[in-house]
Amino acid sequence: MNGCRLLAFGKNVMPLFDLMAANKVKAKVPNNRHTTLKDVNAILGQKMPGVLLYKGKGYFYFAGEGADFWPETIVITTRLGIMSPWSWYKEALRLSTSHQP
């Protein structure tokens, strides 16, 4: 069995990697979960106090005391999950410092 560890269960002998493949368990990774407004706004609250992300009809927008004078505040997309919460934060930074042509 070319160096593979074996596990014996009664009369059955099964290579360890086959046992692991048979008992697939999904790992719960916090970064792999769905993006929610709550997650995005939690990051914004820490990094950009006074700025929140809101959902419009076919778009999302940043609003609040911190975003009142931004040149742009709107992101055109119908899906929040198109970006991770940290990507939404980076987008807020980009919008807050973008210049009007």
Image: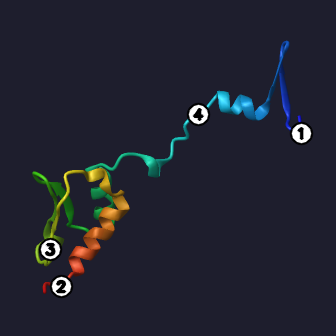
Identify the residue shown where x is 89% and y is 39%.
2
Residue denoted by label 3: 72
Along the horizontal axis of the image, is 58 left or right of 42?
A: left
Q: What element carries label 3?
A: loop
Farthest residue, direction front:
2
Q: Is mark 2 on a helix, strand or loop?
A: loop
| The N terminus lies in quadrant | top right
Counting other residues with Cα less than 10 Å from the Cα at mark 4, is it few (<14), some (14-19), or many (20 or more)?
Answer: few
Q: Quadrant of residue 16?
A: top right
Structural distance between the alpha carbons of marks 3 and 1: 62 Å
Along the horizontal axis of the image, is 93 left or right of 22?
A: left
Q: Is residue 52 above or below residue 6?
A: below
Along the horizontal axis of the image, is 48 left or right of 73?
A: right
Q: Where is residue 55 in the image (x, y as percent from the top left)?
A: 16, 53
Q: In which quarter of the image is residue 73?
A: bottom left
Q: Nearer the viewer, residue 21 or 9?
A: 21
Q: Is mark 1 on a helix, strand or loop?
A: loop
Residue denoted by label 2: 99
Structural distance between the alpha carbons of marks 3 and 2: 9 Å
The residue under label 1 is which amino acid type?
Asn
Q: Earlier in the sequence, mark 3 or mark 4?
A: 4
Residue denoted by label 4: 25
Residue denoted by label 1: 2
Q: Is mark 4 on a helix, strand or loop?
A: loop
